[in-house]
Image (cartoon, helix red, strand yellow):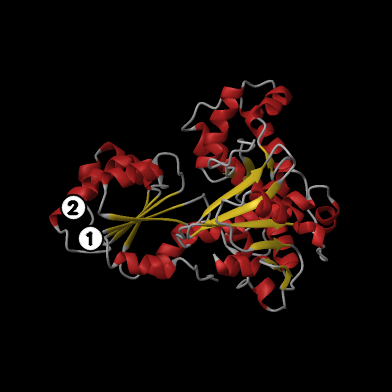
Amino acid sequence: MYIQRGMEKNIIKASKQFPAIAVTGPRQSGKSTMLRKVFGKTHKYITFDDPIIRERAVADPKLFFSTFEDNVILDEIQYVPQITSYIKIAIDEKRNLKGRYILTGSQQFHLIKHLGDSLAGRIALFELMPFDYEEKCSLPALKKKIFTTKDIFIHSCMRSSYPQPNIESKIDINNWISGYFQTYLERDIKSIFDIGNLRDFQRFLQLLAARCSQILNLSAFSADLGVTVNTLKRWISVLEASRIIYLLNPYYNNLGKRITKAPKVYFLDCGLACYLTGINNRETLLNSPLAGPLFENFCIQETLKQILNYQKNVRLYYIRTNNNLEIDLIIEKNGELYPCEIKFNMTPKLSDISNVERFKSIFTKLKIGEGRLISLSEETAKLKENITMEPLRNLIEWI
């Protein structure tokens, strides 16, 4: 079974404009499957995940590159970055030919910069995340019923958003995520970075999951783990680059107020956060003190997916001041700021938008657009002038 990805149209369009296409993103987000579906009939497929093929390519990249013709999918190219120089030469020899090389890479790290620098003007870059809100709605488990924000949230927490455990419903999700982290730690972390004590790193992941949707306090983590702040900063960079976590930065553009400048931390997949915190069933999730933070995490991750998967020119922030004003999400779009509050409840109250009202009244010099309240409610309604409550799906469609 294949779930069509929303990115496909943009990739097909780009393949008619650029000689090369690169799709990066987290491991197991569906890059290879999508590209083989889209280009499988016109392009040969080669994966550097195969150790024999990888060894041949590393030993003599020029000879290896000369063995195949145009129109090829090169999967997991981060293992053989030196081959990009030969791709550049081949492109320049036949610059008018489009869509010849389709590249993928699971590790962000330095891959994007390397491809952008070495193939500047010759390549279109994309980043594919796991299933987004609309893609999940195409799954058989959800397609046969009238689903709600709550349904999608619970499903995302219990099954993650990664394609395989969503399409193959018989997969034990705990075993799958355990294997995912094992592969991630062994192949994407230990083999590339000197992260030090692996057990401390794993414990750090668990602590991050337990504090998702909170302001990142490295000093507190340092005290809990007995690890230096500099080491934690390095670990955060690795986790962020490999799209395990996302740091939401504060908006403090010359506001003249005392603004918290530390970022908030979110997981790119709330299913991973649930696994790390031992939440493995619906009842535990809904009764957990983490239910609210996980719902906020879910809303942020889905908003971010919309931006990354569809290359939207939108920026995300939050804000917290020293007088207890906090806005969960600020969306900067077309020069305006749109404040959003996220509440884990079915029946929103007017008090839920008090911070949005305060934000508008305090920062009068900012260009502030309509405020929003996102909750478990499926209702859309005007709460006050220029402040609306709506389901997450509406917000995503608006972006």
Who is closer to the viewer here, 209 or 40?
Answer: 209
Horizontal side, residue 57 vs residue 357: left or right: left
Q: How crowded is the residue under tag 2: few (<14 C-alpha within 10 Å), some, or many (20+)?
A: some
Foreground residue among 263 and 270: 263
Quadrant in the rendering for residue 95: bottom left
Along the horizontal axis of the image, is 73 left or right of 300? left
**Which secondary structure lies at badge 1?**
loop
Q: Amino acid at mark 1?
A: Asp
Q: Quick one: label 1 or label 2, which is nearer the N terminus?
A: 1
What residue is at 78 percent from the left and 48 percent from the top?
290
x and y, in percent, of residue 106 in the image = 46, 48
Marks 1/2 in contact by CB < 8 Å: the verdict is yes
User: Is residue 100 found left or right of 276 in the rendered image?
Assistant: left
Of residue 397 and residue 229, the one placed in the foreground of this image is: 397
Whether residue 343 appears in this view of the structure is no
Q: Residues within 10 Å of mark 1 (few under 14, many from 20)?
A: some
- Please state, as top left, top right, bottom left or bottom right, where the C terminus lies in the image: bottom right
Residue in the picture at 66% in, 76% down: 143
From the top left corner, tell me how far across and down residue 151 is, in percent: 74, 67
* Mark 2 lies on residue: 90
Which callout, 1 or 2, points to the residue nearer the camera? 2
Q: Amino acid at mark 2?
A: Ala
Residue 310 placement (x, y as % from top left): 47, 63
Residue beneath the point at 85% across and 57% down? 283
Give SS at disc 2: helix
Residue 373 x/y as whole percent: 71, 62
Residue topped by disc 1: 70
